[in-house]
Image (cartoon, rainbow, N blue to C red):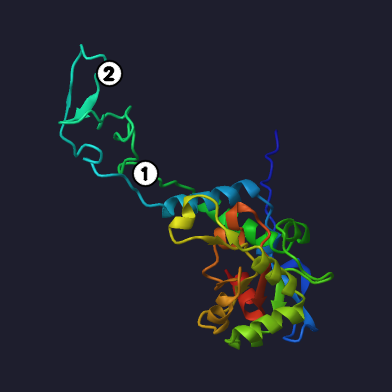
Amino acid sequence: MVEKKQPVKRAKKTEQASSNVNVYGTDGSVKGHVGLPVVFSTPYRPDLIRRAVLTARANRRQRYGPSKVAGLRHSVSTWGKGRGVSRVQRMVGSKTAAESPNNVGGRRAHPPRVEHYFTQKMNKKERSMAKASALAATSDHSKVMGRGHKLKEGITLPVVVEDDIEAYSRTGDIVTLLRSLGLEADIQRAKEGTHIRAGRGKMRGRKYRTPRSVLFVASPGSPILIGARNIPGVSTATPKGLNTEALAPGGDPGRLMVLSKKALATLGGE
């Protein structure tokens, strides 16, 4: 008799990943160690991360288009043949060509349509996998450095700090905290990297573009979530509010993340 193969049982996930990181105090000294949640051991999937970010951006786009009578608000007629000029539509009482798409000043031949949908779909499991993979990339030094972040040598990633930082509300105190952690160079990089945007965007309320710097993650309602937003390039989020776009801006994983010990525990409980 042919013996039936027993199904392979998957090993149960443990609550903590194998690697440990330092827990830093507000003065930059090491106060202890903590194990990373198992989500930080998720396999690296740059394809899913990129697609999740592009999908999120596409779903925020608004449909647009010109008026249905744009370029058609003229009284025009054609001269016909026999005058030695092209038989295009011209303004009545004038020789100026108008309305036809092949004329200077004429309507657009194929304008954008409001019927066009920019929405893209992505499977829930793929979107969840992309978020977990982007979160795991924040603990990889090579990926964080590859994004251009500057940090002191020997610091563990992600940067876990005592829960006292959640009470910080003044921007100056948060800058002092980043200086004690050895992350001031990254803030300076974002500040010096601010430049005028190329293209039409400079006319539409987004003239300047600033590189992304530190991502603060703290418990909901923490004052630091508001106080840190005034620093160039710095973003804030809660553990439940994290998404792939915040963890991997532009689809490039490896965001420099600073979070409280309480927020790290919340990530492990998701």
Residue type, mark 2 in image = Ser
Residue 191, by quadrant, is bottom right
Query: Disc 1 or disc 2, which is closer to the eye?
Result: 2
What numbered label is drawn on residue 117? 1
User: What amino acid is at disc 1?
Assistant: Tyr
| Left or right of 10, for residue 126 | left
Q: Quadrant of residue 193?
A: bottom right
Question: Disc 2 marks which residue?
Answer: 86
Residue under the point 23% across and 28% down: 95
In the rendered structure, find residue 99 and report the number of the disc placed on it.
none
Position of the N terminus, as image quadrant, is top right
Considering depth in this image, is 16 or 80 the residue closer to the camera?
Answer: 80
Q: Residue furthest top?
A: 82
Which of disc 2 and disc 1 is earlier in sequence? 2
Q: Residue 127: percent from the left, percent from the top?
A: 53, 53
Identify which residue is drawn at 67% across, 39% down.
4
Q: Nearer the viewer, residue 80 or 130?
A: 80
- Residue drawn 60% across and 71% down? 232
